[in-house]
Amino acid sequence: MAYLYDRAGDLVRTLYDRRIHGPAVVDMAAHFPEGARFAGAWREIGAEARRLAGHLEDVPRFHDLMPEQAGISANDGRDWHVFLLKAYGTAFPARLAACPTLAGLLAATPAVVSATLSFMAPHKHIPAHRGPFRGVLRYYLVLSMPKRADGSPAAVLRIDGVDHRLDDGEHLLWDDTYEHEVWNDSDAVRSVLLLDVWRPGMPVDMEVLSRLIAAGVRMGIRWRGLG
């Protein structure tokens, strides 16, 4: 299954690479100005995430939801928990109800395709990999960042060879089809909000392809019973 997923991802990336070009890190104001509203509410969203973090045994690990991605999630025996609130347009009402501030922002932001609260265990490493789908951009908002001895952020997000150390309340918009990896070099859980947002201004054929892919993913979600 993992082999088939990887080959399908390579094919999809190749199609998008021929038609859509852009940098690894994307201008927020031009491509997702709504990101400022999520960042403005980071404390409230962070409080909702902390309530979930108190019971991480009830929050699935990434590879529990996507076994074909075990190579990046179950690689080192340390957990990467994800609380999925929305996936490619499919909302999960019970999970949204647990996060009312975040749910309200999502309801007011139709550009958001998927929304996840991500909890990375101490000393967890997500190895270098590439996402397959250039039809969306990835929004990354830090909710709880562990600190190093000098007070700087202990977790690093490396995108296309460049390290990004963001602190609480800081955010970034980027293209996850570029190679990226993550380390949490601390003894505490790192919590972030991850949103996938529609890439604006796509060529018509890529817009159509993106909608078809999203519809296919929604069918897969129903088939797996992830709701």
Image (cartoon, rainbow, N blue to C red):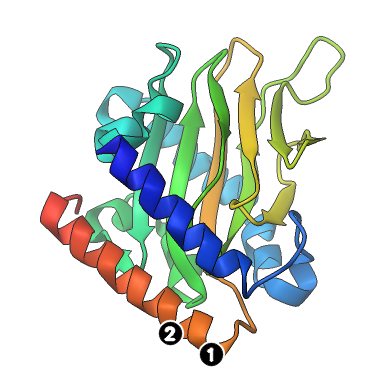
Occupied quadrant, residue 75: top left
Q: Secondary structure at mark 1?
A: helix
Residue at 61% from the left image edge and 40% from the top image edge: 143
Q: Residue at x 74, y 19 (%)?
A: 147
Indicate the quadrant containing the N terminus: top left, top right, bottom left or bottom right: top left
The residue most toward the bottom is: 204
Q: Is residue 46 above or below residue 127?
A: below
Residue found at x 44% / y 75%:
210
The type of residue carrying mark 1 is Val
Tell whether label 2 touches label 1 (CB within 8 Å). yes
Estimate the x, y position of residue 189 in percent, counting from the top left: 54, 22
Badge 1: residue crowd in 10 Å (few <14, some 14–19, many ≥20): few
Distance from the alpha carbon under mark 1 to that under mark 2 = 6 Å
Looking at the image, is 71 positioned above or below residue 2?
Answer: above
**Front residue of 144 and 129:** 129
**In this rendering, position of residue 60 left or right of residue 100:** left
Rendered image: mark on residue 208:
2
Q: Residues within 10 Å of mark 2 (few under 14, many from 20)?
A: few
Q: Kindly identify which residue carries mark 1.
A: 204
Helix, strand or loop under label 2: helix
Which quadrant, please, contains the C terminus?
bottom left
**Left or right side of 80 for 56:** left
Q: Amino acid at mark 2?
A: Val
Residue drawn at the location 71% of the way across and 65% of the way down? 36
Tell me residue 91's x, y (percent).
Answer: 30, 64
Q: Which mark is residue 213?
A: none
Q: Return the x and y of residue 164 as percentages of the image width and height.
A: 78, 37
Q: Position of residue 37 (x, y in %)?
A: 65, 66
- The quadrant in which residue 63 appears is top left
Say above or below: 212 vs 167.
Answer: below
The residue closer to the viewer here, 6 or 177, is 6
